[in-house]
Amino acid sequence: MQQLLLVLVATAALIGGFYLSAQHFAEPAPGASGPSQETLIGRQRPDFRLGSNSGEFVTPADFEGKTLLLNFWATWCAPCRHEMPMLMDLQRNYADRGLQVIGIALDDVQSAREFAQVYGITYPILLGAADVMDTSLAYGNWKGVLPFSVLVDSDGIVRWQYAGELKPPEIVRLLDQHL
């Protein structure tokens, strides 16, 4: 009986999550008001306040003067997991030049914390659900694709957005250009 109840609750949560995701990331109808789909490149970065895997809240202002590589990901996303070692290498190799990689997980807190610990992720991990989806949307991820990455220069200007798994030569070229 407990197993049946657990399966029913899990199924309801899954269906609810898909429904909310579809509603949140649905394309607005022509003429409808909604978030602007203009590019953010060359514009001031949006602000956010998200919880971290260590328990405190974090805002972009906490990294003032740094170039930020924001990487939206999830533990269940295979391309996200594949690019993590490269992101850790970027953090290690470019930290002294002012880079700060920030992982922003669209996941439950416990899964993201465990994942970061098991894989030894050394850069900050921010997490959440609806608040992360809102932040991802504000940074230009109108389709809700994961992974999704954004480069913000040290003055807070968005310089690059990318949906999909990062390609090392391209991101290294961008970092060399903006650091």
Image (tube, rainbow, N blue to C red):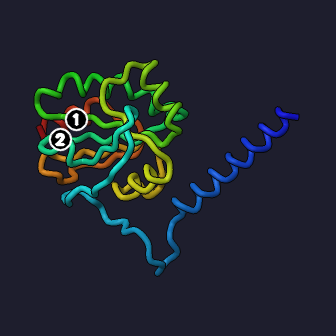
Position in image of residue 128 (x %, y %):
46, 45
Give whichever of 119, 78 is nearer the camera.
119
Quadrant of the rendering where the N terminus is positioned: top right
Q: Residues within 10 Å of mark 1 (few under 14, many from 20)?
A: many
Locate the C terminus by quadrant: top left
Q: Secondary structure at mark 2?
A: strand
In the foreground, 123 or 92: 123
Q: Which residue is mark 2?
A: 67
Left or right position of 131 against 171? right
Choose top left, top right, bottom left or bottom right for residue 63: top left
* Mark found first going from the N terminus, 2 or 1: 2
Q: Say which of 41 and 92 sits in front.
A: 92
Q: Residue at image x 19%, y 39%?
A: 174
Q: Viewed as shown, does residue 150 lie left or right of 82? A: left
Q: Amino acid at mark 1?
A: Gln
46 over 89 or under it: above or below:
below
Q: Which of the two residues, 82 or 96, is positioned nearer the viewer here?
A: 96
Please identify the residue farthest to the bottom as the structure is shown: 31
What residue is shown at x 53% (from left), y 60% (from top)? 24
Q: Which mark is residue 12?
A: none
- Where residue 8 sits: x, y (%)? 79, 43
Cβ–Cβ below 8 Å for labels 2 and 1? yes
| Residue type at numbered disc 2 | Thr
Residue, x 34% and y 46% (percent of image)? 162
The residue that label 1 is drawn on is 100
Name the spot of residue 120 as percent of width and height, x first: 38, 19
Residue at the spot x=48%, y=78% of the render? 32
Residue 167, position as x, y percentages in the image:
33, 33
Q: Secondary structure at mark 1?
A: strand
Q: Is residue 93 above or below residue 106?
A: above
